Image (cartoon, rainbow, N blue to C red):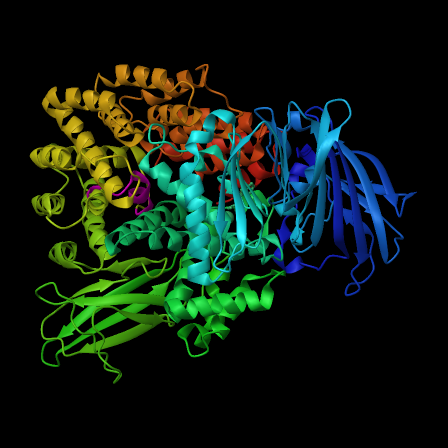
Amino acid sequence: MLLSRDAQAQPVAIRREDYRPPAYWIDTVDLTFDLDPAKTRVLNRMQMRRNPDVPAEPLRLDGDELNLARVLVDGQGASFRMEGDQLVLDGLPDSFELEVFTTCCPAKNTQLMGLFVSQDTFFTQCEAEGFRRITYFLDRPDVMASYTVTLRAEKAAYPVLLSNGNLVEHGDLPEGRHFARWADPFRKPSYLFALVAGKLVAREQRVKARNGKEHLLQVYVRAGDLDKTEHAMNSLVHSIVWDESRFGLALDLDRFMIVATSDFNMGAMENKGLNIFNTKYVLASQATATDADYANIESVVGHEYFHNWTGDRVTCRDWFQLSLKEGLTVFRDQEFSMDLCADASARAVKRIEDVRVLRTAQFPEDAGPMAHPVRPDSYIEISNFYTVTIYEKGAEVVRMMQTLVGRDGFARGMTLYFQRHDGQAVTCDDFAQAIADANPDSALARHLPQFKRWYSQSGTPRVAVRGQHDAAARTYTLDFTQSCPPTPGQGDKQPFVIPVNLGLLGPDGQDLPLQLDDGGPAVAGTRTLVLTEAAQRFTFTGIDAEPVPSILRGFSAPVVLDFDYGDAQLLALLAHDSDPFNRWEAGQRLALRAALAAIEGVPAPGTPVLGEAFVEAMRQVLRHPTLDAAFKELVLTLPSETYIAEQLAVVDPQRVHVVREAMRTQLATALASDWAWAYEEHKDTGAYRPDPASAGRRALAGMALTHLCIAARASGDTVWPGKTLQRFKDAGNMTDRFNALSALVVSGHALAQQALVRFHAMFRDEALVIDKWFALQAGAPDRGGDVLPLVKQLMKHPDFSIRNPNRARSVIFSYCSANPGAFHRPDAAGYVWWSERVIELDAINPQVAARLARAMDRWSKLAEPYRSAAREAIARVAARPELSKDTLEVVTRALSN
Ligand code: TRP
Ligand code: ZN
């Protein structure tokens, strides 16, 4: 909705403390759609009753961009009034039937919320508040109703008619039309409603659950895409099996459907029995999808399927509880992907990747103007709170609970949660209470109110640790202090409950037995310390020589860890730690240290950024006989520019970029023969399979090619770029082909141009591949300011469309959010272009615009001249007379920082 200038001056904040139960309940909903792109008619018949637990008040139904034709109460014309977007009725009986007849225009719905058309097919997106764009309703998650849905449409154009639940009737109608009636056996909130109508085909599979019940699984796509649905279907089958075996949660529907659309604001949506997906998270073939795409499809299919219990069977009382379903469901999809891994090393790789997302995206969010608790206290537009804090930090909070009660204890807690709350709309408190109550003797139960500060306090806690070895007493003492920086609206913070997984490495690099001086038993390997105080001391006995502490193993809490490691200690952890996460972390700390020294110090021209010992350690890892390839690839990947920038008080993005590029060139050159060895050793992965082990080999071979091309650029060698082009041409799968293309583009080799032309010609009809083609160019390293002019050219390409979110993201976001070295230009042209694109997108799709607006979150950390120029660009957006509340909330918060 566009706000007038007046409304815009004072957008209303919705506050958690204002929650009131609804004044009315809706027991049944009977919807009839006459689908037409230009004018769809919606007849909505609701059986309603007053909520006896709250004082009587008028009925207020939410609506947005609807044309209202008729309102009947118990079949009689009723008097009503409009208050803003709300339809208000007074003087209603205690129980009544309300009939509302409206029309809407799906063809003109560019926001992709409510009912919209994508490639001649109707889709809906109702979370969070899209149902009110379909009909007048109590559009809030605590109002749960039974739905019956009749769809009517022209049969030739819309042969497939789908909604939630079971198909109960279908048939032909006069004038070439037909109908289908669906009934959902489960009560649900309106945000889980869905319909799809169009020309689609389905891959089908029947599966038997453990109790012998049969289910029909369907993956619906456009006719040409059926051969790209096998992986999604396999992922769905794996998800069903996993949820039953790990948590005892069975599929509760006869029919479970997934439908793909190429126009979608987010990844996918868990509508009951009718999940709607962005094509990016469904379609895969070895020719068109990379290993990363395969892995993402598996985890998103899992995520939406797991919502069937955590989200649909038990839903959120209000949108402040969003992490109740999202944090928990991300935790579940992370565990699912880990459990599908063949070995501990592949599990660790997945964990490292998840932590990398948390630290490069969520930590900056928690330190910036949009910082909010996992359970926020207020919002202006709920769509802005589908964030990495709600999702990824929320998942870490659930993971800490599992760490505190153990894996079996957590499964018991889940069982209790469903025993208590199946069919209800509940809160984050209810969830934490169930996990604690099922584990009364756990540290979680002992510290529950304090643990819940993870839900209420925003900001990333810092844990500082000091170690002291006493040779005479043979003790090693660790002193922990915790603190949390202030965040918008939150000054002083109270201490958190922080589980710290800890090991101590002896002189030979082996784990020492851990004997605390509290008289408890010695523990071999890792033990979990639970921090609850601002300062806390732990003393270990029987320690002969100063050990190297391996703190926060597996990243057991979402905190920043400060420990004054010496380089030799980090090299020891990198070489020996039994915990693969901390092994990787040690390498990252060494690289970060070198980067920060080069950025902050006075650069002596020509001095290499990386020390010899670090380069040697990287060679050891690369050549290591037993470490697997995926892990090597992670260790050899330098911290990102975004992560490096987060460690600085004042950021000169150009300097960060130059230093990181120098580090990469140094690794490329110094290890040239090792990269060549690694490439030859890992390039053949046999017949294509997307499993973690062969994907790891492809990733390392691809990384080797990139470094060989970078080294070639420095030395003038042409052999490796030539080989890379050949690899690009001969590749048997998209991962190898794209990695070769990327090596040429990233290294800035002249051969890149012809490879890009060829790539486009090969895949001109594959939208998801063309997205990659755009994204690679918009995200390429900047050379003398060449990326912005290229991005402007790409926007004029006939394949570009700003209305398609995937395409807009592939060009605009790849440049503004994923290419800091190119975006932060001393002449401010990147910022000006950003402000124009935010304004342009805001008129089309406010959700996508507001996400782009967040590219400037960290403006106040920038050095001059960037800082002032960035502020000016944000102010230019904020000053627009008509802005969505989505974008207005983001830019207003950015400026008040
Ligand atoms: N609930 C969806 C998920 O699984 C998120 C989502 C999909 C969404 N589409 C949306 C949220 C549109 C807001 C608007 O995570
Ligand atoms: Zn989700």
Which is nearer the eye, 254 or 542?
254
Q: Residue 429 vs residue 715: left or right?
A: right
View extreme (front): residue: 212
Q: Does any portion of residue 432 appear in the rendered image?
A: no
Q: Residue 643 vs residue 16: left or right?
A: left
Ligand 1 rendered quadrant: top right
Rendered view: 30 above or below 447: above
Q: Position of residue 794 (x, y in %)?
A: 41, 18
Q: Position of residue 815 (x, y in %)?
A: 38, 28
Query: In the picture, which quadrant includes the N terminus?
Result: top right
View extreme (right): residue: 76
Q: Does any portion of residue 53 appear in the rendered image?
A: yes
Rendered view: 498 above or below 47: below
Can you tell which quarter of the image residue 320 is in? bottom right
Give the residue drawn at x 46%, y 48%.
303
Q: Residue 2 vs residue 633: left or right?
A: right
Q: Position of residue 802 (x, y in %)?
A: 51, 24
First to last magenta residue range: 636-647
View extreme (bottom): residue: 519
**Quick check: is 356 in the magenta stretch?**
no
Q: Position of residue 253 (x, y in %)?
A: 58, 51
